[in-house]
Image: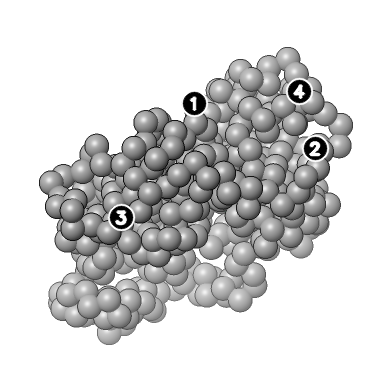
Amino acid sequence: MHLTREEERIYDGECGWANQVCIRILVKLGELFDARELIPISSAHVSGVSYKTLGDAPIEFLEALADSNGKAMVKTTLNPQSLDPEYLTKRLHGNVVKKQQTILRQFGRMGVTQSLTCTPYYLDKPKRDSHLAWAESSAVVYANSVLSACTNREGGPSALAAAIIGKTPDYGMHQTENRRPNFLVSVETKLRTETDFGALGICLGRILADKIPMIRGLSDTSESNMKQLCAALASTGMTNMYQLESHSTLIKKNELQRISIETRDIKQTIESLTTSSTSKPDLVFIGCPHCSLREIKQIARLVNGKKVRAETEFWVCASQHVKERAAEDVNKIERSGGHVLAGVCTIVSWTEMLGIKTIMTNSAKTAYYAPTLNKADTILAPLEECLNTAFGG
Ligand code: F3S
């Protein structure tokens, strides 16, 4: 890989240990994928923030980077942590809280913004064609597909290394020729809810592996539905982007491999993501990926004046940034007995410690991961059904 003189100096350790380790991570990655050079990025987004998913081992590495003056050179945001600063902090035991705070402190010392969200694009929308190093798979697919920015699916360490160097290896999604669709997906059924869009993503991720689909036949491409599709697609496969046929540039469609998705595929996927038949889940959870302002407003309108029923918790997750801007709607949800939790999500939190055994959600991604990561049974259903359950109809 070609390095500039300045990059060589960093590589040789002339700019400190943290910079040296980081550039070495990037060069190794670049060599693996035959990148010719490093290119500047406009932002990084780092995953591996929750103490629950990170564990103890990487904390020392983060401390060492911060001690050696590792500093983010570009705007850098963080994925959700394992608790929010209010509700869950009070309910979880001290050791977990302390460890989580230690992790956040190290990122803070490195100049990373404590955004704690998987929807960093609500804080600052990347420009079209800008190069990023993002490490949250749902946000990666969203950035490439909806925002037309360019990012590979980074891991936590490579995103942090890219943040500290301000560059990433030039391969994969950064190169125009790798962003062309190589699969045509005809959706032969009307997708009615966000849950249907999530189910489409789960279904396609399993079939496509890392192929890029051109999708035909989506009638409602609202932001919320696209967000669910992105998150689910990234859960079951390595696809990093899709294109809608209506937005596609000239492409020889007859050369693409083809599949159709029918009503029964969506129905079967939703059924497979529902593992419980109870009508009284312990938790009803909305906000995977984190809610937008518009989604919080919609929830507040639907729950206004109602009360969460006994023995069910109702959580809505969003970034602190969105929560602050939705204060009036947050109050309505909290007056109804729900909790709007900032900077956390169910999957990366300690729901088992809270005795939560069944989770109902409108997110296909959560329904896919919760049985393994939360040891919980799941019910996947659209928002209004989730609300009817939480509020007793
Ligand atoms: Fe975000 Fe957690 Fe879902 S990080 S995409 S809310 S699993």
Residue at x 23% of width, y 39% of height: 247
Q: Which numbered disc, 1 or 3, marks the residue closer to the eye?
A: 3
Task: Identify the residue position indicated by label 1 in the image.
Answer: 294
Residue 90 visible: no
Residue 237 visible: yes
Name the disc covering residue 258, or none. Answer: 3
- Amino acid type at mark 4: Gly
Residue at x 26% of width, y 65% of height: 172
Tell me residue 51's x, y (percent): 64, 62
The numbered mark, 1 or 3, whose residue comes first in the sequence reads: 3
How far apart are the alpha carbons under marks 1 and 3? 35 Å
Front in this rendered view, residue 360 or 317: 360
Q: Secondary structure at mark 1?
A: helix
Residue at x 38% of width, y 49% of height: 260
Task: Identify the residue position indicated by label 2 in the image.
Answer: 279
351 left or right, relative to 117: right
Q: Secondary structure at mark 2?
A: loop
Q: Secondary structure at mark 3?
A: strand
The numbered mark, 2 or 1, whose residue comes first in the sequence reads: 2
How far apart are the alpha carbons under marks 3 and 2? 39 Å
Q: Which numbered disc, 4 or 1, marks the residue closer to the eye?
A: 4
- Amino acid type at mark 3: Arg
* Image marks 4 and 3: residues in contact by CB distance under 8 Å: no
Q: Which numbered disc, 3 or 2, marks the residue closer to the eye?
A: 3
The numbered mark, 4 or 1, whose residue comes first in the sequence reads: 1
72 left or right, relative to 116: left
Front in this rendered view, residue 331 or 355: 355
Q: Secondary structure at mark 4?
A: loop
